[in-house]
Image (cartoon, helix red, strand yellow):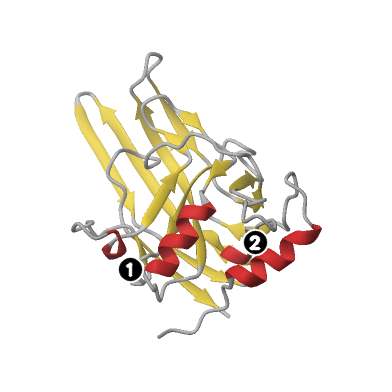
Amino acid sequence: MRSRTTSIAAAALITLAWTATADTSPYAYDGAGVVVTAIDNEGTPITVLDNGAVVCSGTTGVGGVCIPFTEFPQDVDGAFLIDSIHLVDADDAIDSVFQVCVDLNGDGVCGGRANRGNICEGDLVVFSHSTAEGLNFNPLFVNPAGALSLFESCDSAGYPGYIVITCAGLHAHTGAAASTHTHHVTQGTATPMFTGGTPSGDFCGGAAAPAKAYRYEE
């Protein structure tokens, strides 16, 4: 049995002083966790994916950040007062693109392993960008009720929270107003907040997201 700091009971006690519109403190990141080029050049597809990685330490990270479940408190009735993550980059402001992962299988990698009929053999991953339409969903709903429940039931040895992975690159979207657009990443913050639910998308450069390793350093 692993040792974890996550405690549902402790999180519930913390919420007594919170309101449903409260935000938590921001987590600061530097650089992109994954780099994408996925465009069509005179009929020849070009797809370059940098699997990338995230290194987190406390409230900072390179390529993204790690936000513990304890930043998503509940009220006395068990309702989550914080349920989403808002990313703001110094370069791309709120149009930043990212994905959020919960490592259910505890392998230190976000994605990259097929679900073989058992959700605990894979990971939870949610994306803030719609490739087809070029839309961004930021802040992004991350469903802490479901995520925390699965993490506990899978008895995961992974990071007890969300791994936020930033995305930079260039790709075309295929919606009604198809065009090529870019995602920029320099440095910025990811802040847990309340939205009550938002849409989500797919990988920032196409449908097939590469696996991305992460490491948390105390």
Question: From this viewpoint, which residue is outermost toward the front?
Answer: 77
Q: Is residue 84 left or right of residue 51?
A: right
Secondary structure of residue under mark 2:
helix
Q: Position of residue 72 (x, y in %)?
A: 62, 58
Label 2 belongs to which residue? Answer: 71
Label 1 belongs to which residue? Answer: 105
Q: Residue at x 65, y 55 (%)?
A: 77
Taking 96 as reference, is 9 above or below it? Answer: below
Secondary structure of residue under mark 1:
loop
Taking 158 as reference, is 22 above or below it? Answer: above
Foreground pick, 58 / 22: 22
Q: Residue type at mark 1?
A: Asn
Q: Residue type at mark 2?
A: Glu
Q: Is residue 65 left or right of residue 202?
A: right
Residue 32 visible at all: no
Q: Quadrant of residue 29?
A: bottom right
Q: Residue at x 49, y 84 (%)?
A: 3
Q: Quadrant of the C terminus?
A: bottom right
Neighbours of disc 1 within 10 Å: few (<14), some (14-19), many (20+): many
Q: Position of residue 135 (x, y in %)?
A: 48, 28
Q: Quadrant of residue 94?
A: top right
Foreground pick, 57 / 73: 73
Q: Residue at x 27, y 64 (%)?
A: 121
Q: Position of residue 195 (x, y in %)?
A: 63, 39
Mark toward the start of the polypeptide (1 vs 2)? 2
Q: CA distance from mark 1 to mark 2?
A: 22 Å
Neighbours of disc 2 within 10 Å: few (<14), some (14-19), many (20+): many
Foreground pick, 50 / 155: 155
Residue 164 visible at all: yes
Q: Quadrant of the N terminus?
A: bottom left
Q: Position of residue 52 (x, y in %)?
A: 39, 59
